[in-house]
Image (spheres, rainbow, N blue to C red):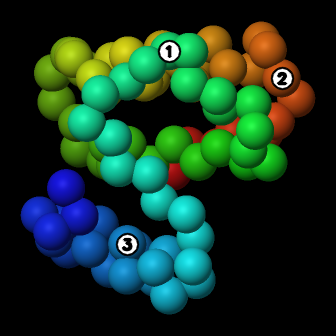
Amino acid sequence: KKQDLQGDAKTNMEIANQMNLPIFEIDYWDPEIELLEFDLLIDALLGTGLKGEVRGIYADVIKSLNDFPKFTRTPSISI
């Protein structure tokens, strides 16, 4: 959640807000979501230092983003 961010994540969220970038915070993931309407997808889900297996909603989102290039020419980047 945005209110729980700290450190670099909080700083980068503040920068994104100042730039009026659209930020989508999700509580569930629907693989049928219309990702095709965007000009660029930025994967900034987990950051660095992840330990262990990715599970739950994060695993679902990552799978969708990994499959995404098969369906469109929309570029995606991970940061």
Q: Vertical placement of 29 versus 7: above or below? A: above
The 10 Å Cα crowd at callout 2, few under 14, some 14 to 19, many 20 or more, is few
| Residue type beneath disc 3 | Met
Cα distance, mark 3 to mark 2? Answer: 27 Å
Quadrant in which residue 29 is drawn: top left
Viewport quadrant of the N terminus = bottom left
Q: Which residue is mark 1?
A: 31
Q: Which residue is mark 2?
A: 72
Residue at 64%, 28% (x, y): give it.
Answer: 34
Left or right relative to 37: residue 52: left
Residue at 77%, 12% (x, y): give it.
Answer: 70
Cα distance, mark 1 to mark 3? Answer: 25 Å
In percent of width and height, residue 27 lies at 25, 36
Cα distance, mark 1 to mark 2? Answer: 15 Å
Q: Vertical placement of 76 versus 59: above or below? A: below
> Is tag 3's residue or tag 2's residue first in the polypeptide sequence?
3
Q: Which residue is mark 3?
A: 13
Of 69 and 27, which appears nearest the observer? 27
Q: Which mark is residue 10?
A: none
